[in-house]
Image (tube, rainbow, N blue to C red):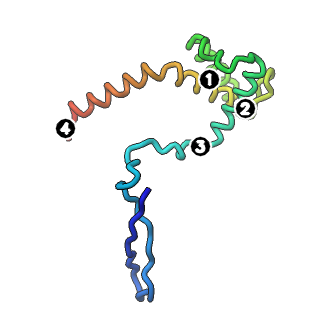
Amino acid sequence: MVNRKVTVVKAGPPDPQPEVQAVPDQTAKADAGKRRLTLVPRRIIDAIALIREYGVKKYTDPDNWKRVEVERYRDAAFRHFMAYLDDPDSMDEESGLFHLWHLACNICFLIELEWKRHWRIYKNGKEGEGKNSAN
């Protein structure tokens, strides 16, 4: 990102040297409108990674989750969510990892498996909003 320098004028007595701050400029790095992945909390990535490491150790194939029916992940997510609601600090007996972390991983699988269909619906809805919008 290219920054251009601007002078910041402060209220009160004048500074002998005005403060110079960087302002994002899109001419060298056009990232306006792109996803800001740094907004995603890092701990969810850690939690999902721990569950995935457990799963790979148990099932050996790191891609086996792609061959599981969506409904089974919905069921698993719901079971882990119910366990979490009953006790937010509860852990899965088999893995020894928190139910909340298992829930996050199941949701992750669901998002991956349903992404194309959901993205198409989302994009079509966004296009429709623009056409029907009064603005």
The image shows residue 27 at horizontal and vertical percentages of 35, 55
Circle 3: residue type:
Pro
Q: Secondary structure at mark 2?
A: helix
Q: Secondary structure at mark 4?
A: loop
Q: Mark 3, residues whose alpha carbon is within 10 Å: few (<14), some, or many (≥20)?
A: few
How far apart are the two marked residues, 2 and 4, measured between alpha carbons? 47 Å
Q: Which mark is residue 134?
A: 4
Which of the marked residues, 3 or 2, is nearer the chain's N terminus? 3
Residue at x-position 26% and y-position 28%: 128
CB within 8 Å, label 3 to label 1: no
Q: Secondary structure at mark 1?
A: helix
Residue bearing mark 3: 41
How far apart are the two marked residues, 3 and 1, measured between alpha carbons? 17 Å
Residue at x-position 62% and y-position 43%: 42
Circle 2: residue type:
Leu
> Quick one: quadrant of the C terminus?
top left
Q: Mark 1, residues whose alpha carbon is within 10 Å: few (<14), some, or many (≥20)?
A: many
CB within 8 Å, label 4 to label 3: no
Classify residue 133 by image quadrant.
top left
Left or right of 34 in this view: 94: right
Which of the marked residues, 3 or 1, is nearer the chain's N terminus? 3
Residue bearing mark 2: 50
Left or right of 90 in this view: 112: left
Q: Which mark is residue 74?
A: none
Residue at x-position 66% and y-position 29%: 85
Residue bearing mark 1: 106
State whether residue 86 appears in this view. no
